[in-house]
Amino acid sequence: MSLKNEYLLSVYETVKKRNGNEPEFLQAVEEVLSSLEPVVERRPEIQEKGIVERLVEPERMIQFRVPWVDDNGKTQVNRAFRVEFNSAIGPYKGGLRLHPTVNASVIKFLGFEQIFKNALTSLPMGGGKGGSDFDPKGKSDGEIMRFCQSFMTELYRHIGPDTDVPAGDIGVGGREIGFMFGQYKRLTNTFTGVLTGKGLEYGGSLFRTQATGYGLCYYTQEMLKHLCNTSFEGKTVVVSGSGNVAIYAAQKAMELGAKVVALSDSSGYVYDKDGIKLDVVKQIKEVERARISEYANRVSGAEYFDNCRNIWSIPCDVALPCATQNELDEEAAKTLIKNGVMCVAEGANMPCTQEAVAQWIENKIPFGPGKAANAGGVACSGLEMSQNSMRYSWTFEEVDEKIHGIMKNIFANGYAASKEYGFDGNMVIGSNIAGFSKVCDAMLAQGIV
Ligand code: NDP
Ligand code: 2IT
């Protein structure tokens, strides 16, 4: 759907004028605004109270310097951000990304998406995101720790268990969260649930490691059932990336009867026609922190190819992009469609370009947008916050069951909204409207703030 409504167009023009050099942020805003026309036309109070103008402007954006000393004694300086985008329905909540491509545009696109994603989970969490252009690749544990401590030495004053609760994202997993938590505790002399994705020994939730990938498959299962009248059983699946989301998406897809034939990293991809062996992948990625190319050296019959984008040339029934933004473009979408793909769901945030999304919609390929399909991670974070507040912990099975229920609801609510507004099965429009409506109602109730 294109942006035709006059009010939405004028808001978008202002966003473009103010943030002209932030392409990822503009892309995310345009996608959401393009879905909102039917709601804006039905509910005049949205325009009267300036809801969309307020939504697209972060409540607060923090940028800071992170100085640290590398193993050679050299001083390094990185740039870091935290965007506190919207707190209408709860404390700011969202991950931290450590990757050389991080800049204001990337953090703002992620923070903006997070507002609607968190609303879709039905848990009380506002939208935020943060990170730094620090590159964790090849760094020693000591360097990672010194960076994380320096990063938290500034960030701690802006966050808190009832204010803003960061978590992991690309380049931030259990190790980094541990270093950051330790520094926060030391600086504030408090032991609180200020971060999620913590280790199990100090307040973490069982299932957080699996949550995003498993949740993605629970959501995809609903799509396959309701939009394709089938299941994962016997399907061929391609998963891009080989990090936290990709590994556990692959694991759950296999448990549900699919064959996963490929994984990638930013250098290239591996193809294993017999089905990826996940124990080998976990050893390479989680234990050795090595490259996915190593897989082909260890598994006979597996092949490695340079250029990760060509992973989409492998014929499959279900495509789950789980690496990074804009990794699947129009050409890749056309190839997947030509090869018979029946369902696509985003484990990563905004991995499909706008042109790729247009291909799914035009060709009626059921498509699950990231803010709905990958919400299992942040939903589990929300449950971790509840467990911390109660000073209690649920079992793996209890959390798994709750996340399964939440993912089913996210699909059901998005699907219902798509039908209510006359776009039956368009999960982009349905999810955007369902997430937006909740945030909008909370903003209306709280006055012009
Ligand atoms: P990880 O750091 O664990 O893994 C990232 C994976 O993506 C790696 O395989 C990495 O390869 C690959 N990758 C990163 N950048 C690029 C790039 N520019 N081109 C190709 N491949 C790339 O991160 P996660 O698995 O946690 O995150 C993956 C995606 O899922 C991100 O979009 C993230 O925002 C999203 N997400 C994560 C959630 C979570 O709970 N962790 C929750 C919801 C969404 P390499 O090693 O070569 O860099
Ligand atoms: O993009 C995401 O939803 C995440 N990286 C998880 C955020 C969180 O707070 O768990």
Image (cartoon, rainbow, N blue to C red):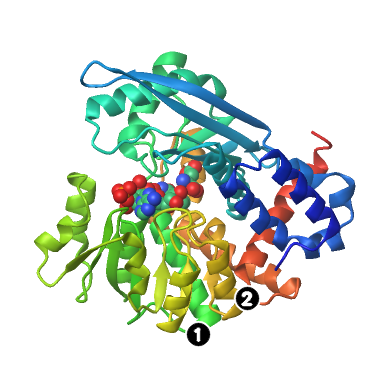
Residue 113 vs 165, above or below: the answer is below
**Between 8 and 205, the one nearer to me in the picture:** 8
Q: Amino acid at mark 2?
A: Gly
Is residue 91 visible in the rendered structure shown here?
Answer: no
- Picture quarter containing residue 269? bottom left
Give the SS element for disc 2. Answer: loop
**Local crowd at mark 2 within 10 Å, few (<14), some, or many (≥20)?**
many
Marks counted in the figure total 2
Q: Position of residue 58 (x, y in %)?
A: 67, 36
Q: Is residue 302 above or below residue 15?
A: below
Which quadrant of the figure has residue 305? bottom left
The residue carrying mark 1 is 229
Q: Is residue 144 visible?
A: yes
Q: Residue at x 23, y 50 (%)?
A: 285
- Quarter holding the N terminus? bottom right
Q: Nearer the viewer, residue 142 or 117?
A: 142
* Cα distance in 3D space between marks 2 and 1: 13 Å
For label 2, the residue is 425
Question: Which numbered disc covers residue 127?
Answer: none
In the image, what residue type sits under mark 1? Asn
